[in-house]
Image (cartoon, rainbow, N blue to C red):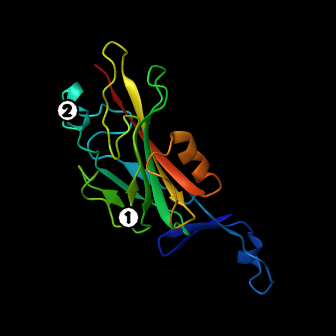
Amino acid sequence: MHLLDFGGKQGIIRHPAAWLWPGLPVILLLIPAVGGLAMELKCPAFPDGGRIPQIYTMPGAGGQNRSLPLIWSGAPTGTRSFALSMVDPHPVARNWVHWLVINLPPETTALPEGASGRALPPGAMELHNSWGTPGYGGPQPPPGTGDHPYVITLYALSVPSLDLKPATSLGEFERALAGKVLEQARITGYYGR
């Protein structure tokens, strides 16, 4: 077995006979040495598993309800759009929807802080959160219920757009994604009071 470097991409030759008998017709099987680059999602405001800063919470929790900044990379070939969700699966919250975005163009690699309602890429659409309003609705967990996990998931889709109504439920959103997700990446932030 031999490790080769092809312009920054490594591969393994699985048939050593290719080196011993160059004249012998041998089919080479090249596989990634480390694996392909997986899609990755990050939030500059906190590390995965970290605490969400108060500025991104609802005013009732002392924040300014600014939508989180997000950056991503490694979208798979064939990505034609992205969708995004932010959901609180805590037993008290029961999958409370904080943010649903669809039809993000495939060339998108980031959303700046405060993009909700103001600076989304052309064509992107924000659905209603569990408060019944469109766009981002930051954390505001009930006091005394401990830290809540806020799971942010980015979906790379094989379709250019989803045709959903603004008041789409989380279940309807998930059903619309079925069979269209090429890859997904997620991070989780925590907040409690």
The residue that mark 2 highlights is 63
The picture places residue 138, in percent across and down from the top left corner, at: 30, 36
Looking at the image, is 146 positioned above or below residue 37? above
Q: Residues within 10 Å of mark 1 (few under 14, many from 20)?
A: some
Looking at the rendered structure, the secondary structure element under dot 2 is loop
For residue 171, the mark is none
**Camera sees residue 38:** no
Looking at the image, is 119 positioned above or below residue 94? below
Q: Residue furthest top?
A: 144
Residue drawn at 47 percent across, 70 percent down: 8
**Comes first in the chain, label 1 or label 2:** 2
For residue 108, the mark is 1
Q: For residue 28, which quarter of the picture?
A: bottom right
Give the residue type that dot 1 points to. Answer: Thr
Residue drawn at 45 percent across, 19 percent down: 92
Nearer to me, 44 or 90: 90
Nearer to me, 59 or 72: 59
Nearer to me, 130 or 180: 130
Left or right relative to 155: residue 71 = left
**Camera sees residue 141:** yes
Give the residue type that dot 2 points to. Answer: Gly
Residue drawn at 34 percent across, 67 percent down: 122
